Amino acid sequence: GESVGLHLPTLSVQEGDNSIINCAYSNSASDYFIWYKQESGKGPQFIIDIRSNMDKRQGQRVTVLLNKTVKHLSLQIAATQPGDSAVYFCAENQTPRVDKNFVFGPGTRLSVLP
Amino acid sequence: GAGVSQSPSNKVTEKGKDVELRCDPISGHTALYWYRQSLGQGLEFLIYFQGNSAPDKSGLPSDRFSAERTGGSVSTLTIQRTQQEDSAVYLCASSLDYQGESGYTFGSGTRLTVV
């Protein structure tokens, strides 16, 4: 289930189940979004991105869904594995894009249970 | 190098001391960014270097923070007279150019603890 931990929202899932991580963004003018994965002791890594002219984009085992009406972004991970345990961040930006203007969410910790 | 390298990986310092954090970006990347990540928070933009242009320092939280980038490559973030609220992970990232579509590559960060 999903709960608010001491510092970060935490999502716990059983290995093999699908995970859905949610992100509410703040700026209705944002039109470019990235999901990052941050493993313990490492910097964030790019997973997948999506532009506002799309509502769905698929990668390898990951799917990002964008609902511009309610300013909501989600990351779906299929068949979650122990290696997926990490903190996941969404980031939003506008076109024309200036990288320093990315706004990052606080992150969600995904914990994969054996 | 193959990735963005930051040093030290961990730094514990006494309140009031100065610290220097180093970032070695990916070779050929013209853009370099510093972010701060406090526990339970998202990434906070600090400063941005692009080529030979003047850096964008708009995110620096106080005049105790400064950064330089020598020869368009290595960057150093300096925090003077450190305070406990400076404790955080300081992340450096680089990208080929600021309009690149792949996002940027982050280093592993320096965890700064001010005691």
Image (cartoon, rainbow, N blue to C red):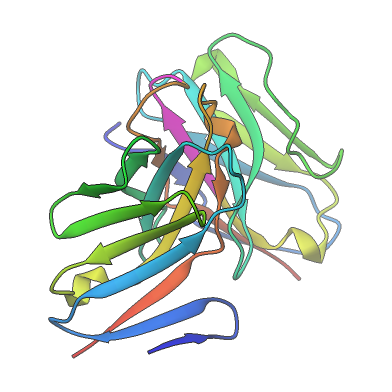
B98 versus B114 height, above or below: above
Q: A100 or B85, which is in the foreground?
A: A100
Query: From which residue to which does the magenta span run?
Result: B91-97
Q: Residue at x 64, y 63 (%)?
A: B38
- The answer to whether residue A53 shows anywhere in this view is yes
Q: Residue A93: x and y, percent? A: 52, 37
- Note whether B31 is above or below A46 in the view shown: above
Image height of B61 relative to B87, above or below: above
What residue appears at the point 59 percent right and 43 percent down from the top-left corner?
A: A28
Residue A21 % position (x, y): 37, 69
Indicate the position of residue B46 as horizontal and vertical percent values. 67, 40
Residue A114 falls inside the magenta stretch: no
Q: Quadrant of the N terminus of chain A?
A: bottom left
Residue extending farthest to the front is A69
Instruction: Give left or right: position of A82 versus B85.
Output: left
Q: Residue at x 81, y 55 (%)?
A: B82
Q: Residue at image x 69%, y 24%? A: B56
